[in-house]
Image (cartoon, rainbow, N blue to C red):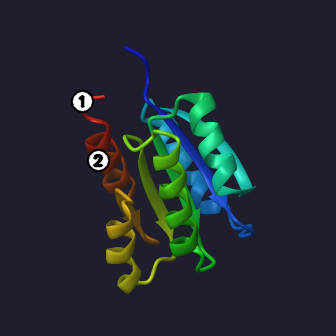
Amino acid sequence: MRKHRILIGKVGLDGHDNGIRIVSKWLADAGFEVIYLGLYNTPEGIVKAVLQENADLIGCSFLGGEHLYYCRKLMELLRQNGLEDRKLIVGGVVPPDDVKVLEEIGVSAIFTPGTMRDTILRKVNELLEGD
């Protein structure tokens, strides 16, 4: 059985990567294959990498308030490329009022600052069950 592949990256111009690097390490330590794209990605680049890497799940971090715009674009591109089955999770500074909007857009999980390691790993495992 192959390891689940999780693609992780920052979208847009936000240069704060401490949190996403820590979460990437947690996921790798838990046995996932992590493809870390780093900073300054575009939605198109993320989706292209999902296709090339055959990623099962996508994780994006947002700290600059651009999460609604980029998540809408990512979900649209995933649908256009036949990747509706790939889950998108988001971490970062997300105002409480935006959590419901992100869920309506199709984001599978939203992790705000202070979310514990075990909570993230439990949710990721839950999302990937059956794959």
Q: Nearer the viewer, residue 19 or 58?
A: 58
Q: Nearer the viewer, residue 58 or 28?
A: 58
Quick one: SS at disc 1?
Answer: loop
Q: Is residue 100 above or below residue 80?
A: below
Pair 1/2: label in front: 1
Q: Is residue 119 above or below residue 81?
A: below
In the image: residue 47, left or right of residue 103: right
Residue lying furthest top in this view?
1
Residue type at tag 1: Gly
Q: Is residue 54 above or below residue 84?
A: above
Mark 1 nearby-residue class (10 Å; few <14, some 14–19, many ≥20): few
Residue 53, image quadrant: top right
Name the disc covering residue 83, or none: none
**Residue 74 picture location, percent across and down:** 54, 57
In the image: residue 15, left or right of residue 68: right
**Residue 26 picture location, percent across and down:** 48, 44
Residue occupied by mark 1: 130
Quadrant (top left, top right, bottom left, bottom right) of the C terminus: top left
Residue occupied by mark 2: 122
**Residue 103 picture location, percent across and down:** 33, 67
| Residue drawn at point x = 35 percent, y = 59 percent | 109
Q: Nearer the viewer, residue 21 or 131?
A: 131
